[in-house]
Image (cartoon, helix red, strand yellow):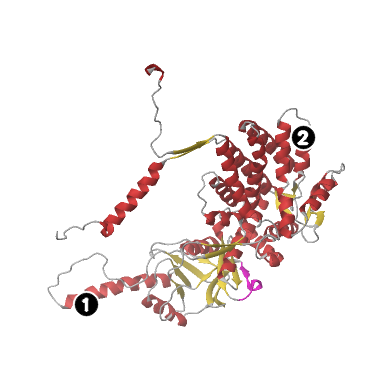
Amino acid sequence: MASMMQPQIILLKEGTDTSQGKAQLVSNINACTAVGDVVRTTLGPRGMDKLIHDDKGSVTISNDGATIMKLLDIVHPAAKILVDIAKSQDSEVGDGTTTVVLLAAEFLKEAKPFIEDGVHAQNLIRSYRTASTLAIAKVKELAVSIEGKSVEEKKGLLAKCAATTLSSKLIGGEKEFFATMVVDAVMAIGNDDRLNLIGIKKVPGGNMRDSFLVDGVAFKKTFSYAGFEQQPKKFLNPKILLLNIELELKSEKENAEIRLSDPSQYQSIVDAEWNIIYDKLDKCVESGAKVVLSRLAIGDLATQYFADRDIFCAGRVAEEDLNRVAAAAGGTVQTSVNNIIDEVLGTCEIFEEKQVGGERFNIFSGCPSGRTATIVLRGGADQFIEEAERSLHDAIMIVRRAVKNSTVVPGGGAIDISKYLRQHSRTIAGKSQLFINSYAKALEVIPRQLCDNAGFDATDVLNKLRQKHAMQSGEGASYGVDINTGGIADSFANFVWEPAVVKINAINAATEAACLILSVDETVKNPKSESAQGDAAGAMGRGRGGGRGRGMRRR
């Protein structure tokens, strides 16, 4: 009898939470579907905004998928994967963040009944990956190249792509105005990949139409000392000196001790300090520069000194702005004022200080390198301007992608991949036919959600769309949802375009995320990390007066 009793095997630490099997997988799918439901209503031109209020009291109003996902602070381990794909879509192509979360959630929702019926997850994963490859090949086949057009034509086409992105944002009402601005900004930096060469400055007040593009660099007037108002505020073709040193009268940094035998020597030490700063200022003036910018402080003495010699100066300029001035004006940031030659000085056609709303801006325009641009945004509330900045960031990314990968596809749920996959699935014998069919159905979530968000009958519109896509001639392939009439329209003819790379990346990322979640069959939650955090918190509490402090008298 004793030999039949098996000893109990304790494998994991006491308190470890493990859940596995079908129930665990269904739970993960439910969590991801819940996340998809949060951002579902933000999709498209008629999408609603979310107001997110965090523990610090700051309020964010946004309908950008990536921003909402970041601010939600999701703790469910499987649902966090959707946050990651939204972030990757945002950094890779800039737009389509809501689309990618929605697609991933819908793929999992379609897979759920199969999992509950006992289908092995690996069969689903294999079919989803096949369907993803077929869908991407179809997108590439339907894409239209914008290569080989004249500059003006290309600008017009890129503006259409930017307008499509902006139509679903808070500033959608002025999409043509901002689309042109974004295209001009991207064209200004040419083939340079650095996004920070396009600066976006926010000035509360005025309306959206007061926003403007500076073909060069603009930044807010920095902190200034007495004497600043005496400096000239406008120059034509000035030389610009960029520094990374302090132009301030400083006492000895180290605690130096100087012993004097004669009181008259004291004056020579004081004079030495003054001579050092005057020597630096003289060298700046001798360089011939009319505008002096420094990343560190320019003190009151230096400000007055430059004002007396008709030179403009600004200290504590942000490093990002200083680097953009260097890129645009062709100068180099100097860490010393010795041996300043003409090659390290920048120049621009016009430098001026202008009043914009309640702020003063230093504006450098007509720069020789011309590889930078600044958008100055105006608007009523701070939250509105913040959302406008996020919207423009998306549009800038989209235009850059369209310039690099010059193929576009019709938007508005127009791509007829769903029909193509349904037809392909009928050629397959076995269970895969059902799985690819469910993948095709999941792709229809985009036009369906566009209709729901606009208040139209999704079933009615989708039936019209399927009928149009099923036409043998293939002319219905570019038809999508018409948000204005509640019917369907040719998205290509209506200039609802987006770069093919957005669609491809979204399908890829959503499929990968769905397959990753389907491949997880067990979650192990280790209590060690939680108890470690608790111990750390307790130790902190004791250290802050929870226990008896050192040197306290015992009672």
The foreground one among 480 and 50 is 50
The stretch of residues the image draws in magenta is 206-214
Residue 133 locus on image (x, y percent)? 68, 37
Q: Which mark is residue 424?
A: 2
- The crowd level at tag 1 (other Cα within 10 Å; few <14, some 14-19, many 20+) is few
Q: Is residue 350 left or right of residue 544?
A: right
| Residue 100 on image: x %, y % | 64, 48
Task: Name the secondary structure under disc 2.
Answer: helix
Residue 10 pos. (x, y %): 39, 30
| Left or right of 519, for residue 502 | right
Q: Is residue 232 visible?
A: yes
147 within the magenta span: no
On screen, 131 above or below 395? above
Specify the farthest residue to the left. 261
Work out which quarter of the rendered image holds the N terminus and state it.
top left
How far apart are the two marked residues, 2 and 1, measured between alpha carbons? 93 Å
Helix, strand or loop status at disc 1? helix
As drawn, 95 above or below 469: below
Query: In front of the other: label 2 or label 1?
Result: 2
The circle on residue 267 is 1
Q: Is residue 137 above or below residue 88?
A: above
Callout 2, which amino acid? His
Residue 147 seen by the camera: no
Instruction: Please name the residue shown 67% across and 56% down the image.
Output: 43
Q: Earlier in the sequence, mark 2 or mark 1?
A: 1
Instruction: Residue 52: name its quadrant.
Output: bottom right
Q: Is residue 298 above or below residue 422?
A: below
Residue 298 shown left or right of residue 432 in the figure: left
Disc ID at residue 332: none
Q: Quadrant of residue 354?
A: bottom right
How far across and how far down the image is residue 377, in percent? 60, 69
209 or 435, which is in the foreground?
435
